[in-house]
Amino acid sequence: MVIGEDGPLGKMSAKAANIEASKRGLDLVKISPNAKPPVCKIMDYGKFCFERKKKEKEAKKKQHVVELKELRLSVNIDGGDLETKANQARKFISNGNKVKISIKLKGRQIQHPELGFVVINRFCDLCNEFATPEGKSVREGKNMFVVLGKKKIEDQKSQDQNVVVSKSSENKENSSPVVNDSKQSVENSEVGIPN
């Protein structure tokens, strides 16, 4: 089966297909040699290779490789240092990378791994606005770690809706007592009770 630039040319022998390709000044390329009958196409093979390489380069340019950045914490880290590390994590995640939070337990800390989990949970709470953990925190021997990834858009939208709903309910609660107070003062003045 031979396919030309305009469309299928039908079945023909390899010799006839080569002659047809040479008449047009093009090449005969086997597209699927294992098919029965084999499928060949008449085309400019050099141009085809050039365009294929060009598409591969474009795909590489658009492609972003996600790196795994690591931040090391300690069990007895201070709050200010924890916030600094959270800011670094925000910067890494905004660049499209993932962040691995790790703690290395030393000495007597090994017998109290819950302290490490507490620090990791505090850090995850600080990063809750822009990142979510990609699984539970894991302990492997002396090391504990968790991987944080960029927060999905759906999670951010649901949080924004929750904030809007809670603000509107607060406004309703705040406005209703004022109305009730004014009614009470009106009722009290009618009865003759001073405010």
Image (tube, rainbow, N blue to C red):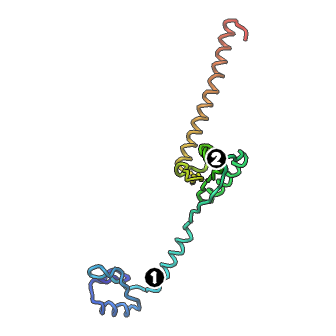
On screen, residue 81 above or below 30:
above
Counting from the top left corner in percent of width and height, residue 103 is at 63, 52
Tell me what residue is drawn at x 59 percent, y 62 percent: 67
Task: Please give left or right for residue 190 compared with residue 52 in the image.
Answer: right
Q: In the rendered image, which quarter is residue 62 located in?
A: bottom right
Counting from the top left corner in percent of width and height, residue 136 is at 53, 48
Quadrant containing the C terminus is top right
How far apart marks 1 and 2 lie (CA) works out to 63 Å
Q: How many marks?
A: 2
Q: Secondary structure at mark 2?
A: helix
Q: Residue furthest top?
A: 192
On screen, residue 102 above or below 15:
above
Counting from the top left corner in percent of width and height, residue 42 is at 37, 85
Q: Which mark is residue 21?
A: none
Residue tagged 1:
48
Q: Secondary structure at mark 1?
A: helix
Tell me what residue is drawn at x 65 percent, y 49 percent: 107
On screen, residue 26 above or below 130:
below
User: For this rendering, which residue is in front, 95 or 50?
Assistant: 95
Label 1 close to label 2 by CB (< 8 Å): no
User: For this rendering, which residue is in front, 40 or 87?
Assistant: 87
Quadrant containing the N terminus is bottom left
Tell me what residue is drawn at x 69 percent, y 46 percent: 76
On screen, residue 55 above or below 25:
above
Which three-letter amino acid code belongs to the residue tagged 1?
Phe
Which three-letter amino acid code belongs to the residue tagged 2?
Gln
Crowding near the residue tagged with mark 1, few <14, some 14–19, many ≥20 C-alpha atoms within 10 Å: few
Residue tagged 2:
109
The answer to whether any part of residue 195 appears in the image is yes
Q: In the rendered image, which quarter is residue 173 located in?
A: top right
